[in-house]
Image: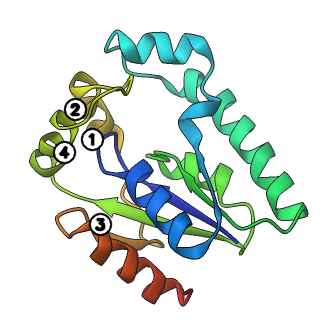
Amino acid sequence: MIVLVMGPTGAGKTTIGRLLADKLGWEFVDGDTFHPAANVDKMKKGIPLQDSDRLPWLQIIRDKMEQWIAEHRNVVLACSALKRIYREKLCISPEVKLVYLKGTYEQILKQLTLRTGHFAGEQLLASQFAILEEPADAVTVEVSRTPEDIITEICRQLAIA
């Protein structure tokens, strides 16, 4: 199984993804590690990525996901997956379960300002909310909850322990 934890920058994808993977004894992969240097450069400068920037990155992630499924690996993957077309590219099998970390702009901005050491900063949050298409088919968990409550709710809704 692959649990794809999605949401805008600052929603807690990496934090929740790592905690969930630790709880389950699964592998954690941050989709940001697959960004080409040009994408990272843009984001560091506060320049929002366009579909033309994201689609090759998403293809790399999709290829990895196909490999993990073929190898029967259980992975928690953090990836923004903001648009429906991005999720359609990534939800390649019934083994991929989508988890949406949902919050208001203000809630996520507050979390984002507390974060250090990440290339995507506050200036990108507005652009991500502008293109966000909330999924109708995901396990949706509010970011206002504690990380422990979020993990418990994800496991409950996906029936995994």
Residues at marks 3 and 2, CA–CA distance in whole angstroms: 24 Å
The residue under the point 12% across, 43% down is 110
Residue type beneath disc 2: Ala
Q: Quadrant of residue 53?
A: top right
Residues at marks 2 and 4, CA–CA distance in whole angstroms: 14 Å
Q: In the picture provided, is 156 more to the left or to the right than 64?
A: left
Residue under circle 2? 126
Q: Which mark is residue 111?
A: 4
Q: Which mark is residue 147?
A: 3
In the picture as drawn, the residue positioned furthest to the right comes out as 70
Mark 3 or mark 2: which comes first in sequence? 2
Residue type beneath disc 4: Gln
Mark 4 and mark 2 in contact (Cβ < 8 Å)? Answer: no
Q: Position of residue 73 (x, y in %)?
A: 79, 65
Q: Position of residue 18 (x, y in %)?
A: 49, 57
Residues at marks 1 and 4, CA–CA distance in whole angstroms: 15 Å
Residue type beneath disc 3: Pro
Q: Position of residue 71 (x, y in %)?
A: 89, 62
Mark 1 or mark 3: which comes first in sequence? 1
Numbered label tally: 4
Q: Which mark is residue 17?
A: none
| Disc 2, SS | helix
Query: Foreground: 83 or 16?
Result: 16
